[in-house]
């Protein structure tokens, strides 16, 4: 049992977070996020759902093999096949947890599972016992607990504790509850369930009504000691409880919560930016803790107060969460050693090949921009994975546009077979023309659903970041691109999204072929 003044941070970005529409990740992207989570200091990384697909199994296995420090966790339904798959995937991990779940609400039992309470209870107990036969660290989740009858929830929590569960999770799966109600449920379970003082009580809240963080903190105040959350709050539908928000709430209001976490808060902003870049999900400017406006002050009275004393309107310092001051750091004459040192200061440790690639990009950028800021360096590093992921790379482009007429685009793309493909297209603007040329070159069919632009730094030569959302065959895929030329950034974002479509399609084909071969 952990100390009662310790709040366990269970991160499920790689499992529940990836279920956010358009946020699927490949293996290398998952490993990069897992490393960042370990550096951040999370206690548990839920790496995936091994029985869901061969790709998920491989991802969990590689995270278990390569990531040291946090407990590595895999999710399973309460059946033998799922639990066996989790244990096999977790085999290389230094510290392992099997996380089993079954739905317990009346609506799920009737319409999804078509099972009676007695069957649910038996399934839960058997699942926990099987997991416990492999592993001493077993978590049980009562899916849709917030809409489950309290008496039945008490019964099932009591039963899984007796069967050997060491953590019991009470999820608000559909974001239905409110803080006072959820706190009362936690207090009820703590008062009524035998042996609950010997396990860790956990909560997993969704944000459908915008209360995931509030509900999680209310549960903690009522006695829960683990919060399940994701970076940037990504996840199913409206998302999950946001890791950076609950951590900074506990940190900033430590006198109220009387709890501590193991999180290195100065790594929050870089980790949030990394996840945003990999998933293609931009961080809203008004996002708490890490949004662009989180430490900005527009109103005159606020600016005056902050200038006199920062604490008048800032309850935390930007540096506490790792926000860079955008100070000028390097120029076109800066060398490789200075470049590496600055990246290390920002928390980025690169392999030699990655560093070489990043340094080349820095030199090209320094020829385009007079001033290089921390945010520019961050953008270079965060784009490394997408630039190397392929299979398509944008090699060159030529755009012609005029008032009152159509735009034309000619693009040259190279595939992973090193074939150079050239396509021309016309559209009602440069992005439309570029998009049509990219689809023609790659053979992908998709619709552009969203196109967002934001500035990464300041000045007329600032880099712009473009985020796009493409829809294909009922699936959303996101992409990002960065450049001092916003049209180029848009084209790079479109190529990134197309690459994600191709990789996802190829992965689906491989998994379908494996399944067919096993029949």
Image (tube, helix red, strand yellow):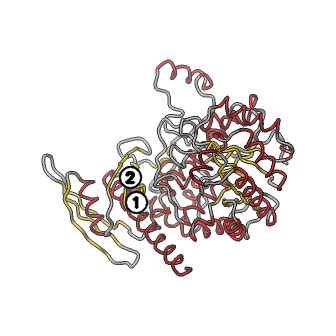
Disc 1 packing (10 Å; few <14; some 14–19; many ≥20) = many
Up/down of 263 relative to 471, above or below:
above
Look at the numbered disc 2 and give the secondary structure of its residue.
strand
Report the number of discs: 2
Nearer-the-camera pick, 487 or 287: 287
Task: Give me the residue at 73% from left, 70% from top.
Answer: 91
Q: What residue is disc 1 on?
A: 497
In the displayed structure image, the side of residue 227 where residue 466 appears, left or right: left
Q: Position of residue 121 (x, y in %)?
A: 74, 53
Mark 2–mark 1 CB contact (< 8 Å):
yes
Residue 79 position by quadrant: bottom right
| Quarter of the figure that contains the C terminus | bottom right
Marks 2 and 1, how far apart at CA: 7 Å
Disc 2 packing (10 Å; few <14; some 14–19; many ≥20) = many
Residue 488 position by quadrant: bottom left
Residue 421 position by quadrant: bottom left
Q: Position of residue 36 (x, y in %)?
A: 62, 55
Task: Give me the residue at 23% from left, 64% from top.
Answer: 410
Task: Give me the residue at 44% from left, 64% from top.
Answer: 387
In the displayed structure image, the side of residue 137 where residue 290 appears, left or right: left
Task: Give me the residue at 51% from left, 52% from top.
Answer: 20
User: Outermost residue, top direction?
Assistant: 301
């Amino acid at each position: 049992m952990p100390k009662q003044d310790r709040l366990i941070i269970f991160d499920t970005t790689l499992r529940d977070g990836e279920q956010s529409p358009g946020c699927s990740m490949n293996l290398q992207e998952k490993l990069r996020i897992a490393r960042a989570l370990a550096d951040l200091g999370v206690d548990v990384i839920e790496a995936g759902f091994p029985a869901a697909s061969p790709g998920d199994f491989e991802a969990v296995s590689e995270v278990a093999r390569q990531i040291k420090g946090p407990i590595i966790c895999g999710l399973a339904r309460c059946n033998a096949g799922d639990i066996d798959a989790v244990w096999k995937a977790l085999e290389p991990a230094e510290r392992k947890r099997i996380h089993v779940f079954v739905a317990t609400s009346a609506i799920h039992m009737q319409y999804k599972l078509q099972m009676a309470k007695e069957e649910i209870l038996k399934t839960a107990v058997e699942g926990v016992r099987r997991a416990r036969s492999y592993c001493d660290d077993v978590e049980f989740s009562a899916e849709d607990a917030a809409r489950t009858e309290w008496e039945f929830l008490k019964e099932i929590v009591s039963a899984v504790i007796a069967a050997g569960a060491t953590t019991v999770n009470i999820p608000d799966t559909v974001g239905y509850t409110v803080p006072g109600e959820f706190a009362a449920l936690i207090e009820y379970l703590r008062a009524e369930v035998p042996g609950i003082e010997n396990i860790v009580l956990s909560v997993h809240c969704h944000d459908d009504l915008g209360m995931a963080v509030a509900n999680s903190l209310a549960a903690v105040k009522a006695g829960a000691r683990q919060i399940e959350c994701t970076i940037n709050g990504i996840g199913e539908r409206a998302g999950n409880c946001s890791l950076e928000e609950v951590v900074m709430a506990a940190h900033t209001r430590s006198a109220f919560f009387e709890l501590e976490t193991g999180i290195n808060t100065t790594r929050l902003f870089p980790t949030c930016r990394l996840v945003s870049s990999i998933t293609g999900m931009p961080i809203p400017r008004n996002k708490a803790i890490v949004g662009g406006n989180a430490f900005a002050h527009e109103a005159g009275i606020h600016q005056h107060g902050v200038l006199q004393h920062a604490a008048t309107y800032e309850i935390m310092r930007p540096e506490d969460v790792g926000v860079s001051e955008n100070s000028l750091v390097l120029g076109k004459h800066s060398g490789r050693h200075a470049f590496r040192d600055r990246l290390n200061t920002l928390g980025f440790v690169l392999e030699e090949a990655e560093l070489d690639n990043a340094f080349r990009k820095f030199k090209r950028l320094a020829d385009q921009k007079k001033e290089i800021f921390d945010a520019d360096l961050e953008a270079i590093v965060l784009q490394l994975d997408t630039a190397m992921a392929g299979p398509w790379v944008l090699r060159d482009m030529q755009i012609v546009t005029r008032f009152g007429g159509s735009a034309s685009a000619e693009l040259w793309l190279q595939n992973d077979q090193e074939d150079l493909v050239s396509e021309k297209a016309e559209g009602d603007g440069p992005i439309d023309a570029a998009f049509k040329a990219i689809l023609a070159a790659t053979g992908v069919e998709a619709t552009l659903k969203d196109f967002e632009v934001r500035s990464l730094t300041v000045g007329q030569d600032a880099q712009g970041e473009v985020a796009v959302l493409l829809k294909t065959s009922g699936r959303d895929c996101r992409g990002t691109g960065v450049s001092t030329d916003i049209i180029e950034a848009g084209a790079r974002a479109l190529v990134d999204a197309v690459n994600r479509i191709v990789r996802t399609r190829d992965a689906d084909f491989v998994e379908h072929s494996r399944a067919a071969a096993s029949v």
